[in-house]
DNA sequence: GCCAGTTTGTTCTCACGTTCACAAACTTTT
DNA sequence: AAAAGTTTGTGAACGTGAGAACAAACTGGC
């Protein structure tokens, strides 16, 4: 959706593959926790919910980390994917807009275990500044620049109302943030070199509604294919 | 991601287009609220953050709703897209798992204005059953079947921990739900004819991290293309 | 050491999605 | 009424992605 392909990178991985690597990583963590030492592409593909040929092709972009006739070493592959994604160390993250959604995000423990550390919670509303969420103080939005430069933050999350989102994004970019995850239902305009990904619940539901509507047409025939 | 293409439908719209229609709809609502009566494909494309050729091709799958030399009537096109998506009437929705995230979702007002109505909040934990969130009672998970059949619910949202998600999905499907929005970080297995869409925050962040890592390599060159 | 069985890595083909470019269809000006 | 200017809808070219199929590379039994 974002991520302009740069010109001449050593191995550059297709965007569709990049989007699946985290799914494989999650599946490998589950397998590892279950004590599985080795798995075939078929098993891992089933755990990740994809076709095994697609999985093998995806992994081939990273290198040859499997053994023919045997499969993949779970922990070794897990490390290689984590390294490729860049989550062998934690990324500092700031969340802006500590309302309903911001609270849920701040309280989410899955962050930490997957390579991210929430270093700051920012909100424009002074009434929120007394609060501590999941052990982190809610601070004034104006502290953004200081926090970003002091902590070397590259990733920002926007959970403010839609009207504020573009302003927040502009300030983030000016402060040095170059990757943004946007929950506000609005299109963000950012300079080249800055990546934006959006999560829009309403859009997801509307896509489901579209297909649901089609199912109910044509009697009970539905989607059988 | 889901949505197997059925065999022989009158006009069936490419999946990539379906995913963008809600974005166009959102942009049209904004334009309409701002009092704009007519807009060109160029303007609408800018508001939606896409290429204008892509927009025109997407709209052409719905029919010929524009006028050459003039553009599109904002309210007319808005209605046509809403009708195509199926959000001219409200869809009843149940949310299962009223924890951190479930609370945020239940409190989200954007639902209502975009074609959805939260008719029930369900949780397995008896301690939650006294609670009222956004005017809706939190009820026992076992009420699922009754609510689904009484209210004709087709869409369910899963916001439980990952370990419970597959069980919840199975119960939903058995109860008659055929579209699921899953926030739990796990792969759901469902029968044909049931659509699943997933929202995974950690995956989104990991995709950003991958690109971020690449930017910091190669000195200050970065993604300039 | 050889043979049978297993599983990866990769090639090839087809389907899908994006973008360009332009004729067709409209409005406005002269 | 014709010419000039806009803007849509779409055909055609290009690029990316998915999946089948298979040779290459390994293991284990004999
Ligand atoms: N709640 C959900 O489940 C949900 C679902 C989908 C999308 N969203 C979107 O996520 C965003 C947040 O939703 P919410 O329900 O948490 O809203 P909210 O109103 O509860 O919280 C918004 C917070 O942002 C703060 N804020 C406002 N302007 C700001 C600014 N300029 N700088 C910093 N902080 C600012 C407010 O003080 C408030 O605390 C909205 O855009 C909403 O559309 C929410
Ligand atoms: N909080 C976030 O911002 C966030 C972000 C990304 C993903 N998620 C995912 O969303 C899910 C919910 O997260 P959360 O932070 O709200 O968790 P939570 O623990 O706060 O809430 C989970 C709720 O589900 C209920 N529940 C458990 N088992 C159930 C069952 N079988 N049937 C019905 N209800 C059941 C629990 O009683 C609890 O109320 C998790 O899978 C999490 O990984 C959350």
Image (cartoon, coloured by chain):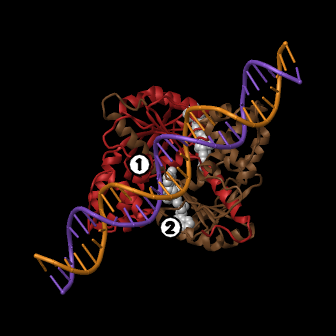
Chain colours: A brown, B red, C purple, D orange
- Left or right: residue A85 versus residue A162 is right
Residue B10: percent from the left, percent from the top?
A: 30, 40
- What is the chain letter for disc 2? A
Res B116 seen here: yes
SS category of the residue bearing label 2: helix
**Mark 1 beta carbon near ligand 1 (under 8 Å):** no
Q: Quadrant of residue A89?
A: bottom right
| Disc number lying in front (1 or 2) | 1
User: To which residue does mark 1 refer?
Assistant: B18
- Left or right: residue B13 versus residue D19 is left
Mark 2 surroundings within 10 Å by alpha-carbon count, few (fewer than 14), some (14 through 19), many (20 or more): some
Residue A214: percent from the left, percent from the top?
A: 35, 38
Residue B6: percent from the left, percent from the top?
A: 39, 35
Q: Split into 4 quadrants, where in the image is the C terminus of chain B?
A: bottom right
- What is the chain letter for disc 1? B
Which label number is shown at residue B192? none
Please tell me which residue is depicted at 64% across the width and 64% down the height of the picture: A7
Relative to B177, say whether B223 is above or below: below
**Mark 2 beta carbon near ligand 1 (under 8 Å):** yes
Q: Quadrant of residue A121?
A: bottom right
User: To which residue does mark 2 refer?
Assistant: A164
Q: Quadrant of residue B189?
A: top right
SS category of the residue bearing label 1: helix
* Labels 1 and 2 share a subunit: no
3D distance between C-alphas at marks 1 and 2: 27 Å
């Amino acid at each position: 959706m974002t991520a302009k392909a740069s010109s001449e990178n050593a191995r550059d991985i297709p965007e569709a593959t990049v989007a699946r690597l985290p799914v494989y990583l999650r599946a490998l963590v589950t397998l590892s926790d279950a004590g599985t030492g080795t798995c075939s592409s078929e098993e891992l593909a089933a755990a990740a919910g994809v076709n095994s040929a697609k999985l093998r092709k995806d992994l081939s972009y990273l290198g040859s980390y499997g053994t023919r006739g045997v499969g993949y070493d779970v922990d070794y592959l897990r490390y290689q994917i984590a390294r490729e994604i860049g989550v062998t160390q934690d990324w500092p993250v700031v969340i802006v807009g500590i309302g309903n959604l911001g609270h849920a995000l701040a309280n989410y423990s899955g962050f930490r275990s997957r390579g991210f550390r929430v270093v700051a919670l920012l909100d424009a509303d002074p009434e929120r500044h007394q609060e501590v969420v999941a052990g982190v103080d809610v601070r004034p939005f104006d502290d953004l620049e200081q926090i970003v430069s002091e902590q070397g933050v590259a990733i920002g999350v926007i959970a403010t109302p839609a009207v504020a989102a573009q302003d927040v994004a502009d300030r983030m970019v000016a402060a040095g943030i170059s990757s943004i995850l946007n929950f506000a239902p609005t299109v963000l305009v950012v300079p080249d070199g800055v990546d934006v990904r959006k999560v829009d619940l309403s859009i997801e539901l509307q896509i489901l509604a579209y297909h649901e509507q089609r199912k109910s047409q044509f009697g009970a025939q539905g989607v059988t294919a």
